[in-house]
Image (cartoon, helix red, strand yellow):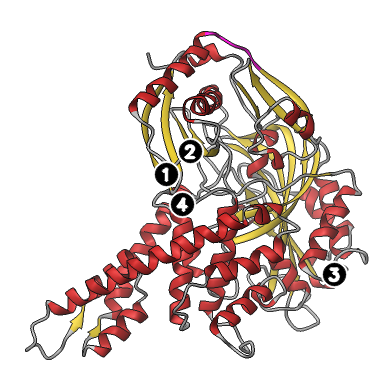
Amino acid sequence: MTANELRNKFINFFVSRGHQAIKSASLIPENDPTCLFTTAGMHPLVPYLQGAKHPAGKRLTDFQKCIRTGDIDEVGDPVHLTFFEMLGNWSLGDYGKAEAIKFSYEFLTGKDYLNIPVSRLAVTVFAGDDDAPFDAEAFELWRSLGIPEERIAKCGKKDNWWGPAGETGPCGPDSEMFYWTGELPPPEKFDPANKLWVEIWNDVFMEYTKTAEGKIVPSAQKNIDTGMVLERVNAILQGKASCYDTEIFTPLFNALDRVRGLAEAPAERVPGERIIADHLRAAVFIIADNVTPGNVDQGYVLRRLIRRAIREGKKLGIERAFTSEIADAVIASFREIYPELEAQEDKIKSELDREEKQFAETLEKGTREFEKLIGRVPPHIEKKVISGKNAFYLYETYGFPIELTVEMAKERGFSVDVDGFKEAFAKHQELSRQGAEQKFKGGLADHSVATSRLHTATHLLQAALRKVLGSHVEQRGSNITAERLRFDFSHEEKVTPEQLAEVERLVNEVIAANIPVECSEMTVPEAKAMGAMGLFEDKYGAKVKVYKIGDVSCEICGGPHAANTGELQSFKIKKEESSSRGVRRIKAVIGAK
């Protein structure tokens, strides 16, 4: 079964069971201050998991593009990916655990679907603790469907409890499904620690909520949230040891072989080839969602991915620009599924070309710094060594891989303290992981009154910016907490103090007018006909929510918002700066006189 067949079978299965198929949302979360990227299918559905009405109904299914960067340094092995697709089905207060488990079992074992023998399946359920009881319902449901009791493992919170991803919010037990990848027959008793049992699906039962006091209490709305990683399941169904061995990556590797001038494909792909394919695939999708390489947030991650791919290319002997040729293969492979790739093709390739050229200049500067380092060593010293600290400096500042430093040092009669480099790198990696735990911790966005008002302020801010700077201004991302808003928008030049003052004046004028914030549900064509800006329109499917603020602002948006502009009291811009190439950033607060 190909990835396209798997994707279509999944969506069609759930559509035939009353679910509405919705489109993948952007990789850039809308108004979730805890995440730089969409890391799971639940992110775009946060308001609806918390009780808001979704325009498409209570039963949804989708394939969601995701980015996870917590293990970016592990990419290159057969397992880890930066970009992946998550297949999911959702119940927003509609059906419960019984239907969810039966749907999963039917899709996994049905001859018209994955047709997996029950003998190769095993599951886990929540064992129970002081917060919530043993999930006897899930246990009995799986057993009634034909999963032997010895193939149902009872696991604790670490393995079978989801959320909350933030400090508070929906959470609950989950049930994970595993597939035996070893020799047949599978062992009769299921041991989750045996790596030959590979997780392929997870059903999350959002039955509880964690309160600000840390208590786990029953939820007012009980939801179902499931997730299946397309690339992993695709490889398993094809009997492949790695998703890099499937048709998903073959066109990318073929393009890389052409760049390298190889007459035939290598028998096995080395880590550097996997890094290039993974990182540039991720970069293509990120740029298509209007992110450009930069020094902060999403732009920084994008830059790191591109430059790491280029470094690996140099280690493979590629001395010319090549990233846009790999991008061609990515776009050709995914253009029908994700039309935004084709629509943004010119921008994707130009950004890659520009970043590649800029990085070449950085490497040139790094080479000069290398020469300075070895020039400081007195000629009479017999044992000439580049310290681990200096080797890591070259890596961190100029992108020099340790292998390049070792090779250049050897040519000049130097050695490199590789162990010292590894120690410095490990320390850096640990700090990065700690930062990632904070930056990429995931979770449900804050939907407090304060945050809702600041969300409304972003609509007023965008309207004012378009009036002062021009209609080219479009939102490129936002980050909203209860204390402040951060709004990224397309604009090439620094906004002058006079322009900022006028933007502030316009927003405060609307606030003083106490205009109601009106919400309507309609089709996308209807929204466009009334002039609504549709920056996130692909997110909601056939019907969308449109928030209208008098004649000032009209946008397709998921909410939440203030009831009227007067609730904002006042608006003050605190800072204006560059976010990335062609994107400016404004930080502002409300309620400050």
Of callouts 3 and 1, the N-terminal one:
3
Kind of residue sitting beneath label 2: Asp
CB contact under 8 Å: marks 2 and 1: yes
Please give left or right for residue 34 compared with residue 150 in the image.
Answer: left
Q: Is residue 80 visible?
A: no
Rounded to the nearest angstrom, the CA distance separating label 3 from label 2 is: 47 Å
Residue position for label 3: 116
CB contact under 8 Å: marks 1 and 4: yes
Residue 117: image x %, image y %? 86, 71
Query: Where are the magenta residues, as a range?
Result: 513-517
Task: Kindly state the secondary structure of the residue where label 1 is placed.
Answer: strand
Of callouts 1 and 4, the N-terminal one:
4
Task: Kindly state the secondary structure of the residue where label 4 is placed.
Answer: helix
Q: Which quarter of the image is occupied by the N terminus?
A: bottom right
Kind of residue sitting beneath label 3: Ile
Of callouts 3 and 2, the N-terminal one:
3
Rounded to the nearest angstrom, the CA distance separating label 3 from label 1 is: 48 Å
Of callouts 4 and 3, the N-terminal one:
3
- Residue 579 — which label? 1
Rounded to the nearest angstrom, the CA distance separating label 2 from label 4 is: 12 Å
Residue position for label 2: 488
CB contact under 8 Å: marks 3 and 2: no
